[in-house]
Amino acid sequence: MKLNQRQEQLLKRTFLDYQQTTEFVKNPLIVHKADGLYYWDVEGKRYFDGIGGIFVATLGHRHPRIIAAMQRQMETLSFVPSMHGIADVTLDFIEKLGGVTPGNLNYIKPYSGGSESIESAIKFTRQYFKQSGKPGKYKFISRYLGYHGATFGAMAASGTGKRKTGFEPQMGGFLKVFPPTYYRERFDSWEACNRFCAQMFEDVIINEDPDTVAGIIIEPIGNTGGIITPTVEYF
Ligand SMILES: Cc1ncc(COP(=O)(O)O)c(C=O)c1O
């Protein structure tokens, strides 16, 4: 799309995640509206939103039930300072979400985005080991090609090479293994390749000293390295 002078000047005064503005203005995208499965840019060109706004608008854009629920909530309560209290509607959410998550994965802290959630998972885990007598357990293992967000902890957990080098040194305590696509041409089957790649987690844990490893962070289905769906056995 073509930028007018005002748009170009304003674009140069803001920032996108992981993209140089000078590159972005050569091939820009300014979105004006969305509906259902589609976006429209400011020139009226329509785009099919094949990944639901990076999995955020998975129920489609402008869903009438979502709009109605948001309006109802805004008219009742628009903000509670999270250091001092919690909204009753948040408890409803915890009940509902906790009712569909598997096993005992029903301890829930709501956040507004992915990066913030990963930061908090890192913090909760480190805090848990500090408070339960294992303060030396602080390392995380994640995967090359994985993406967990743009904040510092989430970026350290991500394995997206060049995207991160502009911000180095990264936060310490983050180790990487390869995703289950690694060396796949050397294996006779997808299952064998997955088994090998899952084994890498154990190898790293043993060699790092298990008493220093706090957790692993992986996407159930990888995205940035291609849509990678591991075997059930891998997990
Ligand atoms: C798996 C995963 N984790 C975390 C994030 C970061 O989420 P956010 O952009 O909401 O901070 C993304 C974003 O695409 C993601 O795909």
Image (cartoon, rainbow, N blue to C red):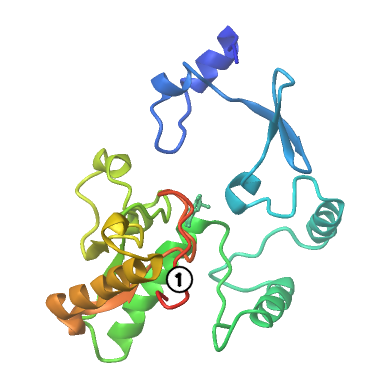
**Left or right side of 38 for 176:** left
**Circle 1 — which element?**
loop
Give the position of the C terminus as an image quadrant: bottom left
Q: Residue furthest bottom?
A: 133
How far across and down, in percent of the image, does residue 214 sit?
29, 78
Residue occupied by mark 1:
231
Residue shown at the point (48%, 62%) measured from the top left: 229
Residue shown at the point (57%, 77%) measured from the top left: 108
Relative to 234, does residue 64 appear above or below in the rendering?
A: above
How far across and down, in percent of the image, does residue 201 sit?
27, 73
Quadrant housing residue 234: bottom left
**Left or right side of 35 for 209:** left
Relative to 91, does residue 27 appear above or below in the rendering?
A: above
Residue nearest the observer in this picture, 167 or 79: 167
Residue shown at the point (24%, 57%) measured from the top left: 171
How far across and down, in percent of the image, does residue 227 sit?
49, 53
- Disc 1 under 8 Å from ligand 1? The reply is no
Relative to 174, does residue 63 appear above or below in the rendering?
A: above
Residue shown at the point (60%, 16%) measured from the top left: 1
How far across and down, in percent of the image, does residue 69 sit?
82, 59
